[in-house]
Amino acid sequence: MSNVISIQGYDLHLIDDKPMVKDLDLAERLGFSRDRDIRKIIKRLIDSGSIMVNEVCDTVAQTPSGGRPSKVYFLGEKAVLKVITKSETEKADQITDEMIDVFIDYRNGNLKPQQDLSRMDILQMAIESEKEKLVLKLEVEELKPKAEFCDKVAISEDAISIGQAAKIIGTGRNRLLSFLRNRKWVTRINEPYQAKIESGLMDVKIGQWEHPKQGLQRSVTALLTGKGLVELQHIYGEVA
């Protein structure tokens, strides 16, 4: 069940007692002219695993014009900050600060002006608020490299070569192939194992070439999918 409360002009939707922001409300604040632009970012971050399942709630709503129903997203605090970071709009920094303040006020129960507070109480609340804001800002900065990496993967619809993957991860092609062989992603002749293909981590490109003596020959080129590249970057980072 959802209730709506207003803090500093922002509407927070309480879904299962968790404060969330509606995607279109955030899009308007950021200056997006089309609904689908912010929803593309949200879907990309969900698909790449940057936004966790418990940080987003979606529902289907009818459009005001009576057209085809569309999916509406409600975003938790961390999801909101990640989407703002990836929006790269002129207002992104301003909206980041405002949203941090809104969620801090929610946690502190500042839903209306506080009464009968001493000057010391007010000062202490201000100090705690600034501390929490600083922590959240640091978290946003830490998320940027991961979000940028996931975005590199998500914007490419096709699988990429091992050489391209090596450049993204920051290693050499032969070194990465050796790593994949040791991890049982590819065979000794560098062809993907069927299990990795079926799990969506790898794909293959089948080609043909003419041998001067043996005639037409088949070539198999290993490819990494976007899902596979995200998984591989995580594993490679742990052992590097």
Image: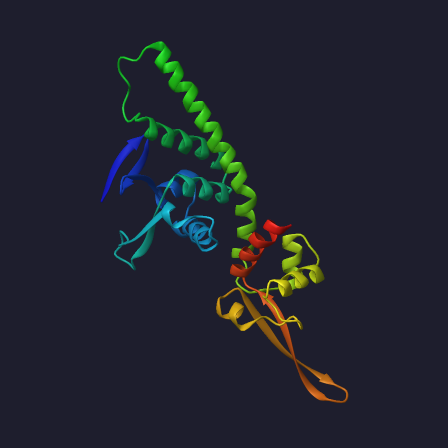
Image spot of residue 87 (x, y percent)? 48, 44
Q: Quadrant of residue 235?
A: bottom right
Q: Is residue 67 left or right of residue 52?
A: left
**Which residue sits at x=40%, y=33%?**
99
Instruction: Please indicate, yes or no, whether residue 183 appears anywhere in the rendered image.
Output: yes
Residue 8 in view, yes or no: no
Q: Is residue 180 left or right of residue 71?
A: right
Vertical order, 100 against 239 (above or below): above
Residue plotted at (54% across, 46% down): 146
| Residue 24, picture quadrant | top left
- Residue at screen point 38% across, 41% down: 26
| Residue, far right | 212
Image position of 5 with respect to 218: above or below: above
Residue at left offset 40%, top offset 52%: 36
Count all numbered tags in the image, as a single digit: 0
Residue 5 is situated, as x and y percent measured from the top left of the image, at 26, 34
